Image (cartoon, rainbow, N blue to C red):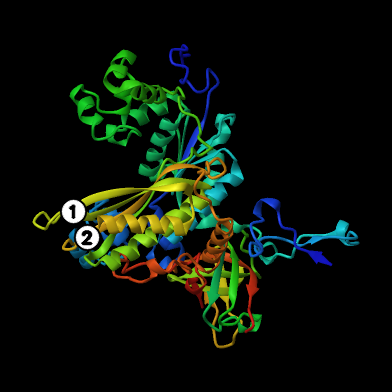
Amino acid sequence: MFYLGRGNGRCPAHGITPMLFALLDCNNFYVSCERVFDPSLNGRPVVVLSNNDGCVIARSQEAKDLGIAMGAPFFKVRELARRYGVLTYSSNYALYGDMSRRVMDSLMRFTPEVEVYSIDEAFLNLSGFKEKDITQYARDIRRAIGCWTGIPVSVGIGPTKTLAKLANRHAKKAPAMGGVAVLLDPDHRKDAMAATPLKDIWGIGHRLAPMLERNSIFTALDLSRQPDAWVQQKMGIVGLRLVYELRGIACQELETVVPDKKTTVVSRSFGKEVRAKADLESAVSSFAERAAEKLRNGNLVAGAVTVFLHTNRFKEHAPQYHHAVTMALDPATNHTGAIVAASLKGLRALYKAGFAYKKAGVMMLSLERAERAQMSLFAREHPHNAKTMQALDSINRRFGSGSIRYGSSALSKNWRMNQKHRSPRYTTRWDELPLVD
Amino acid sequence: MFFFCVKASQATSYEGFPLLGLSPVMAGFPSPAEDFIEGRLDLNEHLIRHPAATFLLRVAGESMKGASILPGDLLVVDRSVEAEAGRIVVAAVDGDLTVKRLAGAKDRWTLVAENPDFPPIRITEGRECSIWGVVTGVVRRMG
């Protein structure tokens, strides 16, 4: 392990003190959520479909073994699914979101130093643990999460985030490891890196892999052995940090504070093509309501909203329309009424009859913290507004999201996405609780 | 005697009284209860010790009538509590969730109903069974 000079002040993250990261992720997360409440799914091929029942976004091991690929469009695998009795579910994000929260809350019981990386992955900072204790600790975490939430997880541990991710892949690929892989020993690490192809390295995508292969680099081990100057020239400073991480020098820290978002988008593809303006108004109102809710949850206000509208770009012979319009919000606001009004104004400017629309959305821009927002001299935010929004949010929280809506969004259901096979919202709806006899 | 106290920044006009989220401010003598005010009773706190591991399930059968667990009741089930003989648990048997009292020992459990119409379920080799969680509360709303 060598110490890096102060060349660019950002790397390494730790100086000489060794760091220890764990990457914990849930196995086949969406399918695992379904299995907790329906144990009859255990051992069977199961897939979960994306919004609109479009493509496969999760597969059980048994479904993977049948050759169903991640991202496969559902219409392509429908026949295979029928023949082999593959159980198909629409995505149930209310359930998955709640189960994710439970997994992350459980992790935080072990250590507060948790970075929630995605809905089913988290990094832990375990620096300071002794090597002999770390494997047992990881096993304890794994057993606890499995017991408390029913979700099976894998844990990878290494001196850098990149190596922790790499270790996690190994924990998954080798069932004999019992779901935990620790890559602290240099020989173990070398073997694991030699067995890791480029596509499995965190940060190497479709663009970089061909270039690396042309230079006879095929594994993580090959990449870690390239000279610094070459790496920096071909892959930039980001690439150099990646290579240092592969070598065991931590260049990334745990991000426990989430940076403020720059934009927030709510959009959907429609279940069937929509031509009527009234249906689009209902859809856009609905997206605007949800976007406003997200802003309030994040304590943000927006200074502008962009409304966009698309026809189906895959239907090449049909007339195409892909446009957007941006409306200013002055003063910057997170009030549903103001955002819905601006979004509808934008939609009316955009809408043209004669097109079959497939997707619409709203994007909130110029976000800033609600406390910091400037009040324009010429517009006044009505003092009742904040209280009305509080009441709206608290009713939706208590009775289920969408219980109370603005009239414009409730008028039409024609644009709602297909969700033909969604399981009950077992943990968030009183009338959809799991039944026990 | 209670007075609603309107903050200066919110005073717009007579109809602008903020009615939500404001608690009464007592004018006059301080309440003798002032130093003894406690938090309100919270059913969540009473029923749920470990929120991340606790789930609510609805009873749909009569097998545990003898334990006063009736169809329509809510079961508070904690997956982090150790399952022991004598406790009422939810178990997954042959793919379905069922609520029964646990008897026997680990790996040799018997699931016992509290209703003569329901025979005990002996968990033998080759039978799919696992303990889903331990029932730590039963909630019934009347009316």
Compare residues A260 and A425 and report the one nearer the observer.
Answer: A260
Residue A151 visible in the shown view: no
Q: Position of residue A339 (x, y in %)?
A: 42, 55
Q: Residue furthest left?
A: A317
Say which chain tag 2 marks: A
Q: Residue furthest bottom?
A: B117
Q: Secondary structure at mark 1?
A: loop
Quadrant in which residue B133 is drawn: bottom right
**Residue carrying label 1:** A321
**Residue carrying label 2:** A357
From the viewer's perspective, is residue A402 above or below residue B66? above
From the viewer's perspective, is residue A377 above or below residue A95? above
Left or right: A120, with B67 as reference point: left
Q: Check disc 2: other Cα within 10 Å, few if <14, some if 14-19, many if 20+.
A: many
Task: Kindly identify the residue that appears in the image at 45 percent across and 42 percent down.
Answer: A367
* Precedes in sequence: disc 2 or disc 1: 1
